[in-house]
Amino acid sequence: MTYADAIRFLYDLRLFGFKLGLENTRRLAALAGNPQVRLRFIHLAGTNGKGSTCAMLESIHRAAGRRVGLFTSPHLVSFRERLQVNRQPIGKNAVIRLVADMQALLRDFPADHSPTFFEVVTVMALRWFAEQDCDLVIWETGLGGRLDATNIVMPLASVITNIQFDHMPWLGNTLAMIAAEKAGIIKPGVPVITATDVPEALAVIRETARVLGAPLIEVTAAAAAHARREIPELPLLGEHQQLNAALTLATLTCLQPTLPVGAAACRAGLATVEWPGRLQVIPGPAGQRNLLDGAHNMAAVAALIAALTRHFPGRKPALIVGVLRDKEWAEMCRTLAPHADGVWFVPVANNRATTPAELREACQDLRSAPPLHVCESLAEALAQTAAEPFRLITGSLYLVGEALELLGAAPVPVNGERGLNEWSVPSPKKVV
């Protein structure tokens, strides 16, 4: 098997679509020897901020001298980003070997009940981190929490960043329903730390923690203000990152008896944290600035606009935007457009994408709409805006990944691995 063969096999797993449920993952993990029992986890769920908080926790524990596994999704460019040890992506040979192992284990499943791409990758990650003798794994949910494949582990702590509207067809149409799914990662007696501030969502988390006897730590905006005085200037842009940092510090404090971290490691980890594709600035020729941000729901759009106001006052960018159909795409575009000098609507290379024409139609009746342009590709939009001094590319992490490639900020995999982020969209009624 070659690496290309391994990636092709993972592509084929997408045919089994996307589903919620733990049965297949538990069975596959058992066939793999239950590697999760040999590992320690911090499990993270939430609507926004999961990845940034994961990156902060990983960076700090690595600075403290630990061998840290990091499991996140989706990837921006390469599949190998999903599985990292001490921020080094898994090697191609390891991917080949692990895929071969999974192929052998999948023979025990009936053809009509085969594990999905995410279920297989979750167990691959568990086996890889156990083989690598990781001291700690920072473990991000894929979607939701209660029925997410990652929820087969018993963590040292459960972290819920926040609760906002996203993935409503699968998680529910109210914040209380979404919170119930995210709170599904809370385990009996295991501490839970959250920065959720929406009353109806926080009530659900509080009640779940009470029933399960899980100590609950609530991180507030005041804690974020205090954290700002305690930590160095973060390399991640955006005021919302201060709350993520406060959540990170609260988690560290909670686990200090089990996972001690000194003040110097904490400062060093936060001062050097990296998380691409989130308010990432990429310089261009002649002083041009490209700002990439994977804002993919209304809460993330609000954080993006706040960051524009704070970090780029008085500047309106050329906005390049593409959004998936299962997002609040019309409201997202209508909210962003007035903050731009011009908008270029582009397709996202994903089978769930909204068309550029639909995005433009959503903005045409805005009273203060800037010039609106429809493009057939991101490459076309970049060409049309090549002379613009300030460009903002946003709406989807998948679009940001493509931008990183086209702007030369990331190597382009031979196999076009961004497509692995695609999954078919089943009827929510069929989700198990």
Image (cartoon, helix red, strand yellow):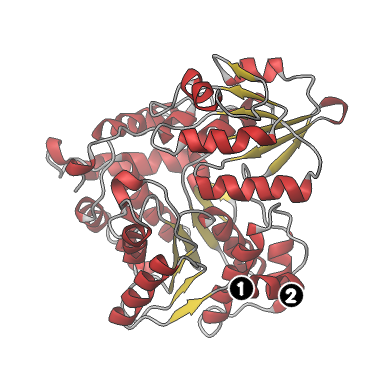
Q: Quadrant of the N terminus?
A: top left
Identify the residue under disc 1: 249
The answer to whether the residues at label 2 and label 1 have Cβ atoms under 8 Å apart is yes
Residue drawn 61% across the image and 65% down it? 243
> For residue 230, which numbered disc appears in the image?
2
Residue drawn 32% across the image and 40% down it? 117
* Three-letter code for the amino acid on which mark 1 is drawn: Leu
**242 lies left or right of 133:** right
Q: Earlier in the sequence, mark 2 or mark 1?
A: 2
**179 lies left or right of 237:** left
Residue drawn 56% across the image and 60% down it? 53
Q: Which corner quadrant of the image does residue 110 belong to?
A: top left
**406 lies left or right of 212:** right
Q: Mark 2 Cα within 10 Å, few/some/many (few <14, many 20+)?
A: few
Q: Which corner quadrant of the image does residue 99 belong to?
A: top left
Q: Mark 1 Cα within 10 Å, few/some/many (few <14, many 20+)?
A: many
* Three-letter code for the amino acid on which mark 2 is drawn: Glu
- Against 343, residue 236 (above or below) is below
- Against 113, residue 216 (above or below) is below
